[in-house]
Amino acid sequence: MPCRLPNAASGIGLYLHVPFCLSKCPYCDFNTYEGLTPLIPAYMAALEREIRLWAELLHGPPVSSIYYGGGTPSYVPPHSIASSLQTVTNLFEVSRDAELTLEANPGDVAPEQIDSWMKAGINRLSIGVQSFDDALLKTLGRRHTSQEAARAALCAASRGLENLSLDLMFGLPLQTLGQWQNSLNTAIDLEPQHLSIYGLQLEPGTPMEADVRLGRTPDVDNDLAADMYTLAEDTLGQAGFEHYEISNWARRGKESQHNLAYWTLQPYLGVGSGAHSFLHGRRFANVKSPRAYARCLESDAAIHNNRAHPVDAMRALGTVGEAETMDRQTAIAETMMMGMRLSRGVSNADFNHRFGVDMSDVFYEELRDLSDAGLIIHDHAGARLTPRGRLLGNEVFARLVEASSKAAQFRPGQAA
Amino acid sequence: MEWMDKSRIRNFCIIAHIDHGKSTLADRLMQFTGAVEDRDLTEQHLDTMELERERGITIKAQAVRLSYTARDGRGYELNLIDTPGHVDFTYEVSRSLAACEGALLLIDATQGIQAQTMANIYLAMEHDLSIIPVINKIDLPGAEPERVAGEIEQSFGFAPQDIQYISAKTGKGVLDLLETVVELVEPPRGDPSAPLRALIFDSRYDPYKGVVAYLRVVDGEMKGTERAMLMSAGVTADVLEAGFFSPAPEKSAGLATGQVGYLATGLKNVRDCRVGDTLTSSRLPATAPLAGYRPLKPMVFSGLYPADGKAYPELRDALDKLQLNDPALVFEPESSTALGFGFRCGFLGLLHMDIVQERLEREYDLSLIATAPGVNYRVTLTDQSVVEVDNPSRMPPAQTIAEVREPWVELSIIAPSRFIGPVMDLVTGRRGEYRKMEYLPTRSSMSAGANGPADAPANDARVHLEYLAPLSEILVDFHDQLKARTQGYASMDYSLVDDRPADLVKLEVLVNQEPVDALSIITHRGDAQSQGRKLARKLRELIPRQMFEVPIQAAIGNKVIARETVRALRKNVLAKCYGGDVTRKRKLLEQQAEGKKRLKKIGRVDVPQEAFLAVLKIDRE
Ligand SMILES: Nc1nc2c(ncn2[C@@H]2O[C@H](COP(=O)(O)OP(=O)(O)OP(=O)(O)O)[C@@H](O)[C@H]2O)c(=O)[nH]1
Ligand code: SF4
Ligand SMILES: [Mg+2]
């Protein structure tokens, strides 16, 4: 394949999925469940088994970041986090400066918890604050108060955590610009190193989407949401945060290493139910149901790695569901739609290194039109979004993804 | 070859107001004669088109041959044609009538005579058919067979013993009805020894068999092996296959005098084989063709354009082929600055227009843009020349026009008398003129006495109202309003009568400062202001926000009468995109790009297909 994506030898990201929550929030469409608490022990055991199987199949490649996501990883007992992390460090080559993140809900963040997570190796927490307004927290179905959220953040810092991220949401039904400014200010005062700011997306199938569709909850004003985003950009910029991805801000050097790997199409392995992986040029996903997943890994099944691709061995076991090989066109499309999310954009040199052709040849018209529309800047270094382009990212991504079908006409070594 | 003795053939159709149960009766007739096995029978079995099933109405007339052993012990061949009930498909009915000697006139026992009942019986009488009145749905709790029988007797002059009572649903009375058909419908006339003359009453295009003609043999006989000739086109064709419908097509050696069936001509040029033409044998041709059909005058016109300009040749081909199966459709090429090359099409009504568009899209895999429907104007210019204008953008400049005439229709409405007021209001609000009113007679009102004098009818008496009205006023939303104001009780029918001078103006629409010819409409001067405002507002709702602000204006001449703005889109971005959702998000973006392709670019503005029909979606009242 005339397509050189980063390979596993230089380190992979490891994602561990924890599909449990105290209660399911009405806007959430993640693979997570509120009634599955009794399954936690069996599930965490299965997770460790899966880690072991992969270590064997992949011969323990270097791991450059680890991320416990969910669901609510802080909801499961800290010792099971410690135990699984131990398994990882035993069997994989985890680099010394690797970023080890755990997602946590404010209600779970207490001194003992933080201590045991940090002892296990966790060096970054991502706390799901969402808002510092109690009324809005209620609309979001969150169990915590703004005060608890603030306390959690302060507590983390006081126990010596040096890399804290807070999640905030805007564009919520009934949210005002004033409330949003308050949340931003409160967040800044808590001195996190990183902030993720998400515009509410009404996902089909969620209770909140139905409420809005049926008029039981007021719809979100798209223009107001745009104003809120701009307000966040200004406020966080003034507070010295770097806006490095559409929804992410950080102090210099504190950008999320794990997430950067996604946006630059680095390889990663996802373990746990429904977790997605991208390894050896293939995208694949585990079975979604935590029960079905745990059942596949009930006994210490031995696997036979006599197959062409390690994924096929896991498919035989039943943990991996769908799998697809990424063709060059898709690789180009995803390089653009993911890379353009970053403030630094996609560099001409990287693109050419990966695909053997120039970005400005493949996307000649698109880059020209999008520049003319003021959505991107395209220069000798590469292409990246303008502030207006960040708000209209889909207009850019959709155009580029669609145009990737032209990629076949541009082969390495051919004159354009 | 063994032919069915012509005295044992009965050709008849089922006609009725919409939903009075024609297709359901056809089900029972097929079931009771064993044409379809019980386990294979679906409800409204002959409504085979996807659109018919979805909408629960018959669109195409459908012929079936049944074998029936009558109580006299003899075998009969019955050719039945199920017809549609909606006004817009009347042409299907009149063509079917020409292939029959008899008609079953169905009347719903809960509803009585409706507007299409009247229209259809007059059609059947013009064709000189024996008509058997049949009261259907007698199983329903609200059925009033007595009252309905009274209406039929008094309105159409039938005797009580002429009327049949059935339930097409339960099958009650249907066997007796079969006997009545054998008894009362005349066997086909026609001369078996004369040269072949067969009337083509319907057709369709088959990619393998070419044009398939549905025909009724009037004289002579058609052998499947003989070369056929189409008399008006003067074309000959090798017959690939002859047969009949049972209801599935079934091959046969040929068709004898009086029989109804089909013939695959192998003709690839659809213009060579026209509905209404006479088919004869090329070896021994007939001297004179049959009367054929009166050409039809379309009522409504609209432009049909391929959403993708490159598909113009496909659209032309599809229209040619569809017209075979829908001879009420007429079309000719036209072009629009906004939409490129397309066709001005004439239809019998808005439902017909809608069905044609749907059929073209489904059966021929096209994506189409339809422009606002309008009527045909006769314009006299100041130099006294006369032009017909069926496309608003072709309306000559106001200063060159001496007079514009618009088509008027005779409007017939049947409704319970308590709704006379609301109906009057509706029609006069649409510039209609009252012509006359008649109470539908009932037995009690005729035999008088008990309920008082005949000129003071009972509360539930029903009236037949007649009006004259401009066609353009009853095209859009009139039928819905009529139903709404009469709690669903009123029914209507209309036919073109003449044209009259009218005070009309052309309403132009500008999108992003550019006039869009495909959006212009012609409207009565008095309505222009409010129509313009409503149209602009509707367009603002229908045109999605773009990356820049889009002004929408409605103008008469150079004067802007309404202005709306589609505000610029400010935010459209996926908040999250991490490792778990790359594929899903990529597909979402592909869909977004795909969706954009379905929009029509007018200058820099992406306009959705529905916007061109915005005028249909504005509230008149
Ligand atoms: N109860 C009852 N319902 C009936 C009877 N005959 C027809 N229907 C119902 O009436 C509705 C209309 O029946 P169709 O047979 O589709 O009527 P149609 O006259 O063919 O309608 P168009 O072809 O659209 O004009 C359906 O819901 C039938 O089930 C009957 O004898 N009794
Ligand atoms: S806590 Fe997070 S993962 Fe759990 S339901 Fe709420 S939003 Fe979803
Ligand atoms: Mg029907």
Image (spheres, helix red, strand yellow):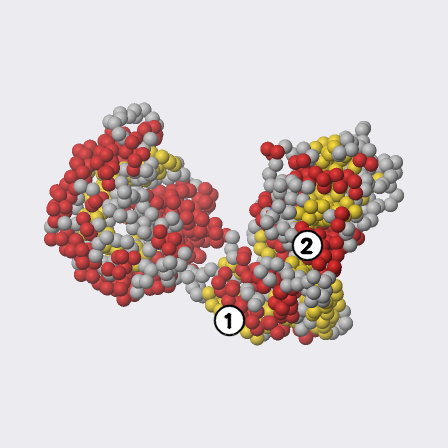
B253 or B30: which is nearer to us? B30
**In the picture, residue A321 is in which quadrant?**
top left
| Whole-percent x, y for residue A155 in the image | 13, 53
Residue B572: % across, % down: 39, 57
Residue labelled with disc 1: B563
Separation of residues labelled 1 and 2 (CA atoms): 56 Å
Image mark 1: chain:
B
Q: Nearer the viewer, mark 1 or mark 2?
A: 2
| Residue at image coords 70%, 33% | B250
Decide if residue A229 is on the left or right side of residue B247. left
Q: Which residue is mark 2?
A: B147
- Residue at 27% x, 44% y is A34
10 Å crowding of disc 1: few (<14), some (14-19), many (20+): some
| Res B404 seen here | no
- Side of A207 relative to B450 (left or right): left
Is ligand 1 within 8 Å of the beta carbon of the residue shown at mark 1?
A: no
Tell me the SS state at disc 2.
helix
At label 1, the amino acid type is Arg
A355 to B352, vertically: above or below: above
